[in-house]
Amino acid sequence: MATQLQMQKEDRSIGELFSELAAETGTLVRQEVSLAQAELTAKATKAGKNVGYLAAGGAVGYVGLMAIVAGIIMGLSYFIPAWLSALLVGGIIAVVSYVLVNSALSELRNMEVTPTETVESIKEDAQWLKNQVS
C-alpha cells in the first residue's frame, strides 16, 4: 500500500506538483493573514484599554479638582490662609493626576505593536517553501 502511494507521488508531473504547491501556498498565505489579523486585534485591544486608562486618569484628575477642592480648601482655610490651602490641595491633585497619566503613557510607549508571531511564522513558511522548491 505504501509503495503504491509512493509510485503515485512519483508519477505526478511537474505541472501537478507546481499546482499543488500553489494551492498549498495560497492556503498558507490565507492562514498567515488570519494570524496577523488576530494578533493585531489583540494588540489594538490592549492599546485601547491603556488609552481608556489614560482618559480615566485625566477624568479623575479633573473630577478631583472640581469636586473635592472646594471642600478641602474651605476646611484648611480655618488653619492656614485660603490661598495657601488652595495651592496645597491643587498640588496634591496634580500629582495624583500626573501619576495616572504617566503610568498609562509609559504602558503605551512600551507596547510592542509588531505582530512578532506572524513575522516568525512567515519566516518559517518561507523556509518551508524554499525547501519544497529545492
Image: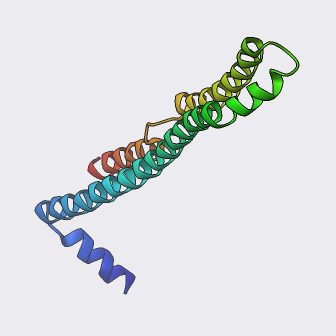
Which of 105/126 is in front? 105
**Could you tell me which quadrant the N terminus lies in?**
bottom left
Considering every residue shown, the one lying at the far bottom of the view is: 1
Which of 120/90 is in front? 90
Considering every residue shown, the one lying at the far left of the view is: 15
Residue 73 quadrant: top right
**Is 26 placed above or below 78 here?**
below
**Is 14 placed above or below 85 here?**
below
What colour scheme governs how the chains and residues are painted in the rendered image of this protein? rainbow
For image coordinates 81% across by 29% down, the residue present is 75
Q: Is residue 23 left or right of residue 91?
A: left
Residue 92 position in % (x across, y down):
74, 23
Considering every residue shown, the one lying at the far front of the view is: 78
For image coordinates 59% across by 29% down, the residue present is 101
Residue 107 position in % (x across, y down):
59, 33
For image coordinates 51% across by 43% down, the residue present is 52
Q: How many marks?
A: 0
**Is 30 placed above or below 106 here?**
below
Residue 97 position in % (x across, y down):
64, 28
Residue 77 position in % (x across, y down):
80, 20
Residue 126 quadrant: top left
**Is 97 placed above or below 14 here?**
above
Q: Is residue 18 left or right of residue 94?
A: left
